[in-house]
Image (tube, grey):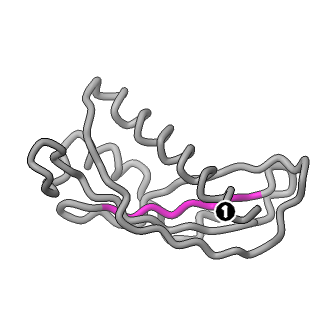
Amino acid sequence: NNTSYFLYFEEARTRFFRELASRHSRSFHSMLVSITCDYINQAFAHQTLRVSTRVKKIGTKSFRLIQLLTDAEKGKIIAKAETVTVCFDIENQVSVPIPDFLRQGLEEYLAADDSLE
């Protein structure tokens, strides 16, 4: 089901964010404010899928990720998502600048282009 792709992308983003936070033993709060998905090829039952995540752009308070869902065996692209995430102060309910430690971590994953190929 094509709505399942959003769950795969979310799981990969969660793992990505956990990894960035654990490197510095620091946490941060963020909010997904946009996600788009291009369906490129069909996926089938019993197919092993892989999600790759890269950073497309880093702003002052937000960043864009590109995620590819691919057939793990053949490398064929199934779907491509683009997300916008905002750093957020949950107590005051406002967006905040990206913390330095997070910015440094995101910079390590900047993609040369958005294809990830």
Helix, strand, or loop for circle 1? loop
Q: What stretch is highlighted in magenta?
A: 63-70
* Residue 43 in the image: above or below residue 96: below
Q: In which quarter of the image is residue 44?
A: bottom right
Q: Which of 3 and 37 is in front in this view?
A: 3
Give the residue at mark 1: 3
Residue at the image position 64 percent from the left and 51 percent from the top: 51
Question: Is residue 82 on the magenta stretch?
Answer: no
> Where residue 80 appears, x then y in whole percent?
62, 68
- Residue type pointed to by label 1: Thr
Residue 1, relative to residue 51: is it above or below? Answer: below
**Which quarter of the rendering shows the C terminus?**
bottom right
Please state the horizontal and vertical placement of residue 99, each as a whole percent of the image: 18, 45
Between 6 and 97, the one nearer to me in the picture: 6
Please indicate whether residue 20 sits to the left or right of residue 89 in the image: right
Q: Which of 108 and 64 is in front in this view?
A: 64
Q: Which residue is drawn at 15% across and 46% down?
A: 89
Residue occupying the point 32% across, 61% down = 63
Say which of 101 and 37 sits in front: 37
Whether residue 82 is situated above or below residue 5 in the rendered picture: below
